[in-house]
């Protein structure tokens, strides 16, 4: 599907979704499962006003990820760029009143010993 922002979406991200199953001891075990199709995306740092709101609410929001309006991305998903090795945890997914895009508010997941980015 193409849309008004298609030409701006310059990455393909894998979607990993939490899946719970019984652990055999009366509880649940949660793992991440790769979803069938990657999503086209554009990854940006949030605006100054978004960063201010995040700081005031003690949020770890570090990136805005723009997606097609039909992209199946949900709160709790992880988005992964296999080309760069970058990963983000999705905190929220929002859309404008006119569905021209979806925006995932996410936190960059850094590996041990990586510099802040």
Image (cartoon, grey):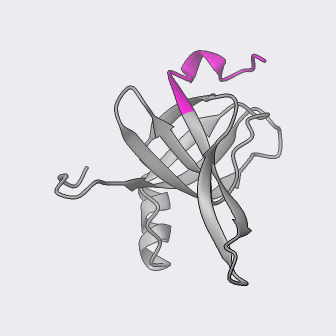
Residue at 55% over, 21% down:
8
Q: Pick the residue in front: 113 or 50.
A: 113
Q: Nearer the viewer, residue 84 or 35?
A: 35
| Quarter of the figure with the N terminus | top right
Residue placed furthest toward the right: 98
| Percent coordinates x, y for residue 93 in the rendering | 68, 53
Residue at the extreme bottom of the image, as rendered: 26
- Count the numbered circles shown: 0
In the image, taking residue 75 as reference, residue 69 lies left or right, namely: right
Tell me which segment is drawn in magenta.
1-13
Q: Nearer the viewer, residue 97 or 12?
A: 12
Q: Position of residue 37 (x, y in %)?
A: 68, 28
* 17 left or right of 69 in image: left
At 31% across and 54% down in the image, what residue appears?
110
User: Can residue 6 be found in the magenta stretch?
Assistant: yes
- Residue 83: x and y in percent read 38, 25
Q: Is residue 86 above or below residue 60?
A: above
User: What residue do we see at 38% from left, 55% from top?
Assistant: 109
Q: Image height check: is 88 above or below 22?
A: above
Residue at 34% over, 31% down: 84
Q: Is residue 37 magenta?
A: no
Of the pair 46 and 116, the residue shown nearer to us: 116
- Image coordinates for residue 92, horizontal then vertical, percent: 64, 59
């Amino acid at each position: 599907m193409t849309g008004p922002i298609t030409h701006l979406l310059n990455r393909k991200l894998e979607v990993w979704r939490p899946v719970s199953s019984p652990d055999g001891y009366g509880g649940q075990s949660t793992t991440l499962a790769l979803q069938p199709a990657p999503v086209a995306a554009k990854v940006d740092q949030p605006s100054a006003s978004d960063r201010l709101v995040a700081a005031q609410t003690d949020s770890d929001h570090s990136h805005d990820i723009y997606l097609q309006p039909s992209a199946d991305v949900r709160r709790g998903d992880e988005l992964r760029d296999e080309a760069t090795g970058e990963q983000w945890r999705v905190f929220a997914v929002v859309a404008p009143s006119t569905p021209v895009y979806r925006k995932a508010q996410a936190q960059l997941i850094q590996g041990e010993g990586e510099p802040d980015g």
